[in-house]
Image: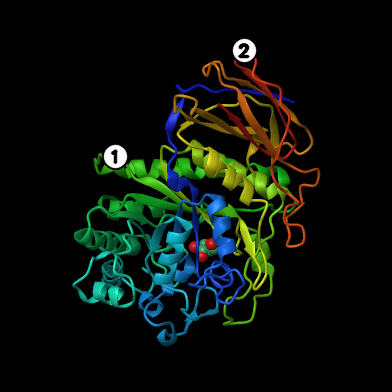
Amino acid sequence: LHASLTVDPAFRVADVSPRTFGSFVEHMGRCVYTGIYEPGHPYADEDGLRRDVLELVRELGVTTVRYPGGNFVSGFRWEDSVGPVAERPTRLDLAWHSTETNAFGLHEFHAWAAKAGVEPMMALNLGTRGVQEALDLLEYCNHPGGTAWSDQRIKNGAREPFGIGMWCLGNEMDGPWQTGHKTAAEYGRLAAETGRAMRMVDPGLELVACGSSSSSMPTFGAWEATVLEEAYDQVDYISCHAYYEEVDGDLGSFLASAVDMDRFVESVVATADHIRAKQRKKKRINLSFDEWNVWYQSRFEAQDKPDDWAVAPRVIEDEYNVADAVVLGGLLISLLRNSDRVTAACLAQLVNVIAPIRSEPGGPSWRQTTFHPFAQAARHARGTVLRVEPVAPVYDTARFGEVPVVDAVATHVAGGEGADELTVLAVNRHQGESVELALDLRAFPGYALVEHSVLSDPDVSATNTQQAPDRVRPRAVDTAPVVDGRLAVHLQPVSWNVIRLR
Ligand code: AHR
């Protein structure tokens, strides 16, 4: 098969937002306990944080981390998670039918985030709680001192405020599974009043209102419209959540998951802009795609659940294969392509729970297949996003109709003096055929190929395991040089490709 695309600095979308490469740590399963935190592990540091996992988090290139949930947050009493560990109460976590010891809490997360070099994005409980508790938490985290809650933080060991700038006003409040689930009108009012009060404390906070927990929710579209009718002035973002999986062996549709993500973004942007027009606002609401990933949710629904009320049980520890990594790469391409409106995103989650990083209690940690596209994009997709509009053959899918076999996006850093960088991220979604992709780079005179890296495998179901942690990884391939501004690259079937030029 043959395809082509043109890269030109004139086709600018927006700057790459660093927050596109966010992730998510929830008190769920083994994400926190025996994930990022495991006192007594041979690699644990003085705070009980796993150094091996911290190293992988840094290598992954994660920028922002949403915490502490997720469904968990809708029953979370943050006060339980501060102060002397021995005095912290143990609670039932209704979201995951687990027992929460609160051994890891706000201060531990703050210490972890500093060591990981990530910006925290704090989620508030608007399920069982409201405006006052949100204000208390904000005062505890961000006020310098001299008030009850800020002095309590200082007493608990943190003289300097945590300085958290981005806050999620609840989690998936549209979902009937959510503790304290609300109608759009109820939630919209609560989000508006919580946001208004928080901004009385600090007008500079960036606030995220809950959008739909998936585009298949019956209230999708109407939910966003009602919430923004109420809260347009008080928020900066509306959230999107989407999880993808191969259903009934339909790999073709699964590989085209980015088509769904593009449509999702388009619909939420249209809804937000509709309210903008109705209310005659100048400000635009951006999208925080703060939960996205591959998740074999149907397997989870069908499975026997772990023991009721266990502490840190194994929950949704999906093992990802080559096809999953290619899909994840396609979703990253979609997020980048929509960088004019999607300015924050979180891969859900970070460790063990549907995660790019796996770790065993007392044992090793390793990179799942999906680690690689994320790490490569976080490292190399920098500067400005450029639209590339591939011209490619199509294939038929049951879910989306005809879909181009190649999807791609480019980014460009105009650094000058040898610091220029051009990166093309591309997937070949065809299951049987390679694609000869012709890149027209004449708008970048003098650029030469640095590397063409490929993640693919004759066995698309190959995975990385504790025994074979590097079975699937990107490999550099030989590619002919750029000649007269043209480059030809070979895209393997079901592959993720990073083409770097300078
Ligand atoms: O990431 C797993 C769960 O998925 C989160 O807790 C919830 O917000 C979503 O439904």
Quadrant holding the C terminus? top right
Secondary structure of residue under mark 1: helix
Residue position for label 2:
484
Query: Where in the figure is residue 341, as x and y percent of width and height?
Result: 41, 40
Mark 2 lies on a secondary structure that is: loop
Residue 304 - label: none
Q: Is residue 319 above or below residue 254?
A: below
Of the pair 72 and 366, the residue shown nearer to us: 366
- Residue 178: percent from the left, percent from the top? 46, 69
Q: Is residue 293 above or below residue 81?
A: above
Residue 158 is situated, as x and y percent measured from the top left of the image, at 32, 70
Left or right of 410 on screen, residue 306: right
**In the image, what residue occupies the spot 59% across and 62% down?**
52
Front residue of 410 and 477: 477
Q: Is residue 486 left or right of residue 479?
A: left
Residue at horizontal 37 percent and vertical 80 percent from the top:
83
**Can residue 332 be seen here?**
yes
Q: Which mark is residue 277?
A: 1
Of residues 100 and 209, the one drawn nearer to the viewer in this rendering:
100
Q: Residues within 10 Å of mark 1 (few under 14, many from 20)?
A: few
Q: Is mark 2 within 8 Å of ligand 1?
A: no
**Would you identify the image quadrant in which residue 315 lies?**
bottom right
